Image (spheres, grey):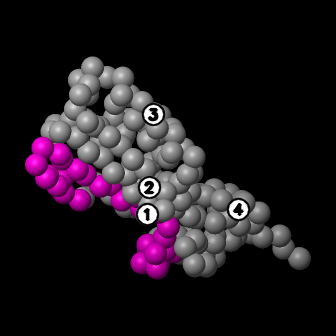
């Protein structure tokens, strides 16, 4: 009887780390001299999974995004979780930007991951299970090599590894 080992490849962030990164950014906005009296705000909506930012100038808005990115890095969150493709909207003297948060593997991303693994390591089995990919092998070394392959590949999504067995 052979023993098999497995883990799941997912794309999820830690909600508490995300909340902490946004809170630290909000505190920095409140204390920085260049943001005094500008009405700059940042808000994290857990329900709709997005971060809303507003300020009185486009430059200050971009500065808030840069500050948020630095907090992401310090908290160990991947910058790929933020979708910065949305444009800045302006109404009167208020500039707003919404940053939707991307998590979860859709079918196309999961298929891309499984194809990459199967092409490189044919002995490793992959299985798509909803929004995660189960990776199974008889060799722990192969599983570690797959992990290094996925971390080193230029995928357009952040990946986490969970449920080690």
Which of 84/136 is in front? 84
Give the numbered dot on residue 45.
Answer: 2
Q: Measuring from the top left, give residue 141's x and y in whole percent.
A: 68, 57
Q: CA distance from mark 1 to mark 2?
A: 6 Å
Q: What kind of element bears circle 3?
A: helix
Q: Are marks 1 and 3 in contact (CB under 8 Å)?
A: no
| Disc on the earlier residue, 4 or 3 | 3
| Residue positioned 55% across, 73% down in the render | 131
Q: Which residue is mark 1?
A: 48
Q: What kind of element bears circle 4?
A: loop
| Disc on the earlier residue, 2 or 4 | 2
| Residue positioned 84% across, 73% down in the render | 2
Q: Which residue is mark 3?
A: 24
| Disc on the earlier residue, 3 or 2 | 3
Q: Are marks 1 and 2 in contact (CB under 8 Å)?
A: yes
Q: Which residue is mark 4?
A: 163
Q: Is residue 51 visible?
A: yes
**Viewport quadrant of the N terminus:** bottom right
Which of 156/77 is in front? 77
Q: Which residues are magenta?
A: 86-115
Q: CA distance from mark 3 to mark 2?
A: 15 Å
Q: CA distance from mark 1 to mark 4?
A: 26 Å
């Amino acid at each position: 009887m052979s023993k098999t080992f497995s883990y799941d490849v997912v794309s999820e962030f830690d909600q508490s780390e995300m909340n902490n990164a946004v809170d630290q950014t909000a505190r920095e906005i409140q204390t920085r001299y260049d943001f005094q009296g500008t009405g700059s705000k940042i808000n994290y909506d857990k329900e709709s999974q997005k971060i809303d930012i507003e300020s009185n100038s486009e430059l200050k808005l971009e500065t808030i995004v840069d500050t948020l990115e630095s907090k992401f890095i310090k908290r160990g969150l991947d910058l790929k979780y933020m979708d910065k493709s949305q444009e800045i909207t302006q109404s009167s003297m208020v500039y707003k930007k919404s940053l939707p948060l991307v998590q979860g593997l859709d079918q196309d991303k999961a298929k891309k991951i499984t194809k990459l693994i199967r092409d490189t390591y044919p002995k490793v089995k992959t299985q798509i299970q909803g929004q995660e990919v189960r990776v199974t092998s008889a060799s722990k070394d192969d599983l570690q090599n797959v992990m290094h392959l996925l971390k080193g590949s230029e995928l357009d999504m952040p990946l986490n590894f969970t449920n080690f067995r």
